[in-house]
Amino acid sequence: MDNHIILLILTLLILTFGLFSKLSERSFISGPMVFLSVGILISPMGFNLITVNLDTEIVKTLAELTLILILFVDASYLKYCRLSKILAGIPARLLLIGLPLTMLVGAFSAQYFFPTYNLWVLALLALILSPTDAALGQAVVQSKMVPKRIQESISIESGLNDGIVLPPILLCISVLGSGITSLNNESYWLTFMATQLFIAPLVGGLVGYAGGKLVDHATLKNWMSHTFHHLVSFALAILAYCAAELIHGNGFIAAFFAGLMLSTKIPLVRTQIQEFSEAQGKLFSLIIFFLFGLVCVPNFYIYWDLNLLMYALLSLTLIRMIPVFIALIGVKIDFYSKIFIAWFGPRGIASILYLFIVIVELEVTGYEQLMAVIVLTVLFSVFAHGITAVMMSKQFKAISEDANSESTKNCQ
């Protein structure tokens, strides 16, 4: 009965929000805010209409499918032949300097707030809270007022950092799951990392490259309908995931590399693949935010205390912003742009999905505070970044107008 109620509420929510989705893009009310809030309202924290356990199979399956599709879509937007050019500027600094520093600062800061946890747990916490989610500040990446260079930098960073942090997250989970918190068995861990970092990318890359070539060939021969151009992205992402898992590689990393190496050269085909993938990814993401409000918040709010509150706030501010400012030293952009990039590091869908992976692999017992602080940080981020996105984007227009006014005065 509960499943039917969830399906009914979710369907009505998608329909209702869809009717006003264009208005949402111009307001401070974002899709994740709405879906998360409704999830909380019908949970035991609200009207107690539905109770869903963390280990419910549908939660696990949706989380895995969402992560697979998002990793594939994010990577597919970066044509692999242009990757070095795309990453040459601000995104390279954010990913190669800002991201590692954020992880380190996050882990070392966590030692003060959670002294009872070992270093592997603290590293896992910092890693899960490092990826950003540009969709939480939708107005930022869609607004015409935000300079294109800033938009692209934020989008590329959020598109790639979830894939970058995945291997070390899996390493931490494996170490903690084995019960051994030191790396004494060097051969085992070297084999594990080789499998994650070489076999999975190789399998995923082959699926993406061969799949793209087959799609192009079938399209040029007029064998393939436009309908299946839309569907093939989902098929390739799942194929890469399953193929890697069958040979003990990591399917999520494989899905990312399948998108990165997607070789289709026909512009219309690539556009159709990406548009469908993006639409499905967005749908799954909103469902995950709904489940996050329905399942995660009610299960972990009892663990929230001052320590968790302070770390969550630091994670969204200093732990993110200081590394970004360091990464942007020497970049020729104005100070407000640096503040803007530093602030818009929302924690969203990637952090939630990695949290679900931890719950599946390690279970909850013994890691309650770790999971509770992730839930609290994401909850703050959904509302803080959603509310400030439009307001801070408009500030670029005001700055531009002031600069033009000053220039006019100087000319006179």
Image (cartoon, rainbow, N blue to C red):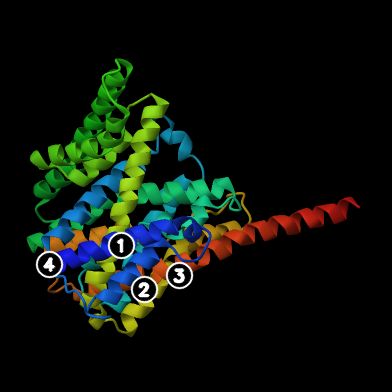
Quarter of image, res 254? top left
* Residue ID at (24%, 70%): 294
List the residue tagged with mark 2.
312
Give the quadrant of the N terminus.
Answer: bottom left
Task: Name the mark nearer the viewer: 1 or 3.
Answer: 1
User: Which amino acid, mark 4?
Assistant: Glu
Structural distance between the alpha carbons of marks 2 and 3: 12 Å
List the residue tagged with mark 3.
384
Structural distance between the alpha carbons of marks 2 and 4: 22 Å
List the residue tagged with mark 1.
12
Structural distance between the alpha carbons of marks 1 and 4: 32 Å
Q: Are circles 2 and 1 on residues that touch, CB within 8 Å? A: no
Circle 1 packing at 10 Å, graded few (<14), some (14-19), many (20+), is few
Q: Which of 76 and 232 is in front in this view?
A: 232
Structural distance between the alpha carbons of marks 4 and 3: 29 Å
* Residue ID at (63%, 57%): 396
Mark number for residue 39?
none
Circle 3 packing at 10 Å, graded few (<14), some (14-19), many (20+), is some
Circle 4 packing at 10 Å, graded few (<14), some (14-19), many (20+), is some
List the residue tagged with mark 4.
363
